[in-house]
Amino acid sequence: MIWKIFLFLLLAFVSVAGISFPIVENPTRWYEFPLIPGLEENAKIIFFHVPTAWLTVIAFLMSTIYSFKYLRKKNLDDDVKSYAAAQLGMIFCILATVTGAVWAKFAWGSYWSWDPRQTSIFALLLIYGAWFALRSSIESEEKRATLSSVYSMIAFVTVPFFIFIMPRIMSGLHPGSADDSNAGPVVNFKMNGNMQLIFFLSMIGFTVLYFWMWNVGYRSMLLKEKLDKKLIRG
Amino acid sequence: MNKKAYSLFLKDFKSELRTRYAINALAMFIIVAISVILFSVGNEKISASLTGGLFWVVIFFTAMSGLSRAFVSEEERGTTLALQLVAAPTTVFSGKLIFNIILVFAMNTVIAILYSAMFEAFVIQNFLLFLTSFVFGNIGLAVSSTIIAAIIAKAGAKGTLYPVLAFPILLPLILTSVQLTLFAIDGISFERAKFELAIVVSYDVIMLTASYMLFDFIWKE
Amino acid sequence: MINYSLEASGLNKSFGRRLIFNDLQFKFDKSGVYGISGPNGSGKSTLVKIIAGIIGASQGKIFHKLDEKEIAEEHIHNHIGFVSPYLVLYEEFTTYENLKLFADIRGVKFNQERVDYLLNKFLIFKRKDDLLKTYSSGMKQRVKFIFALMHSPQLLILDEPTSNLDDEGKKSVYEIVKEEGQKNIVLIASNEKNDLELCSEIVLLEKFKN
């Protein structure tokens, strides 16, 4: 219980700090952020966009790992865990796409420009969507778990193409892609100590939030299944 | 093993010759798809790069029209059991893959020919590059389409689900192949396109390996 | 007498969370006719499909042994013949073409003599070059038997072999079962009293329901 309160306070602090701390040229006070050329005011979205993008990848990885476990042991509990992870992954993917599009509008002028990272997150959204569509078309529990697990594995195999190869060959606007000499605020540590702190706190806060939601999610689904079974048995 | 897979392919081929379900529908689909683009574009001059992209649009949707038949026809008629009784999963996948590869090559050759005839901007300068990317792109298309076809054959709502599942998986292949087609149109040298070609070839290898490993789970319930 | 043995050990099957049977054991190591019985929905078809290698078990294993040596999973299908009401062959081909193509896909040489013998025995020889879709259901059932027997399997699995058959048809099925049971193992999954009367040993599925 206590840690949930801590989590709430942490995320509240991060949200408030992220949005309200002013950005000045030469930060002198502890609550001031430095000015990063090219990003300026928009930099604040980094506290929200990067964690959601990071988490959708984590969720996708977890969903795939549990799919793999299911294929090996055929234990339906693994399938439920995979599903819980995918649900959260989908939500975070939508959030990442939207926060990314908002940032894009302010930084590059338009909401969408088929930059390779944007294309990749969109592809991930398509994969999630396809996965859920596949699941809803199969009635038998076992078949649904097996077929969607196989699809997860196939999707997993194509993901390296998006992450590593696409950004190299396609020019992009994203900080850190092929033709951007500025490797991005995180890598270059253009953030000062305070900003980095808020950033990492945000990452940690969101990650803990995700794991907590995933845990509650799959346990409630498992309980629901047990209850359904009891009701049928009578 | 190859001879058995080849026999399965022959069975599908002969069956197709006899009933002609797929060929007729596919041929008409290609004509309709290209006509739709022609009519929509009207008298506008479309650039070479646009034709390159549209080329792969037609290829993708034609593939979605015809490549699921390999597995769906067995499921729909109930003959899957007979196949499960006589062949190992590897044999079945190989046989269906051979059929789909041949189908893809046939379809795409027709599309390429019709396309060059209908769109003047579609002129290939570096033919060797086009041919190479054509061959490896087709193989990749066939492999991915076949494994996804195996998945949806066992699910409901087969027709609409097929492009939905296949598109994200094919996306890296399509993006790179469009790039290569544009290179070929612009006359970029083979040397400079090596990285993109490597991507397509590695896609083929990776998808082929993954498909064979995963097919067992789909086929044997 | 061919030395084929079929053994099930700790066999357990569930569909999703629904248990079909648990800790199933049996061993058939002599030629003969054996039965699997249980009320409708008790898992007879499921069990024979697991034995034929079409479905996987949730736990446990089935051992197919020839001369004491275990046969690898990829090869068992050439030792098994399977007949059931839900088996469908390729209707756009003739009987003869069907048999030939299945032999090719199996990778087994097409035994012309044996096929002709079976075609005659099941009274289909005259119509072997007719498309399967022109056959009556009784004739299709006979073709399924030929399909199951043409590669001389050591294990013949029959799922509900006399369903939808008239007395005449049932009689010929029983003849074949007795004949094959002399040299090979015949497994019948059925509820019919007459079917089960042929069996020397019967696996009762209700016993493994706990």
Image (cartoon, coloured by chain):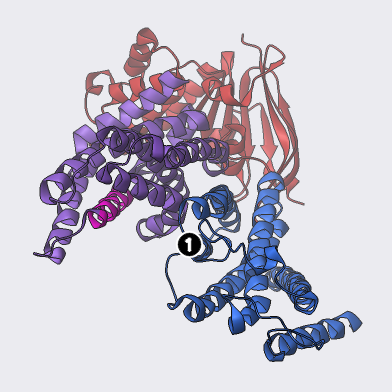
Chain colours: A blue, B purple, C red
Q: Quadrant of the N terminus of chain A?
A: bottom right
Task: Please tell me which residue lies in front, B126 or B30.
Answer: B126
Query: C74 above or below B49?
Result: above
Task: Please tell me which residue lies in front, B42 or C140.
Answer: B42
Query: C150 above or below A46?
Result: above
Image label count: 1
Give the image location of residue C171, x and y in percent: 43, 28
Query: A169 above or below A26?
Result: above
Whether residue A84 is visible to the viewer of this picture, yes or no, is no
Q: For mark 1, give the secondary structure.
A: loop
Q: Residues within 10 Å of mark 1 (few under 14, many from 20)?
A: many
Give the image location of residue C115, x and y in percent: 36, 14
Relative to residue C113, is residue A94 drawn left or right? right
- The answer to whether residue B120 is magenta is no
Q: Quadrant of the C terminus of chain A?
A: bottom right
Location of residue C120 (image quadrant): top left
Residue extending furthest toward the left = B43
Residue at image location 59% in from the left, 49% down from the top: A153
Relative to residue B139, is residue C52 drawn left or right? right
Whether residue C59 is visible to the viewer of this picture, yes or no, is yes
Chain for mark 1?
A: A
- The answer to whether residue B54 is magenta is yes
Task: Please tell me which residue lies in front, B105 or C145.
Answer: B105
Give the image location of residue A191, x and y in percent: 72, 73
Residue at image location 31% in from the left, 26% down from the top: B10
Task: Please tell me which residue lies in front, A222 or A56.
Answer: A56
Amino acid at circle 1: Gly
Stretch in magenta:
B49-67
Mark 1 — residue?
A172
Magenta span main SS: helix
Query: A92 above or below C110?
Result: below
Location of residue B210 (image quadrant): top right
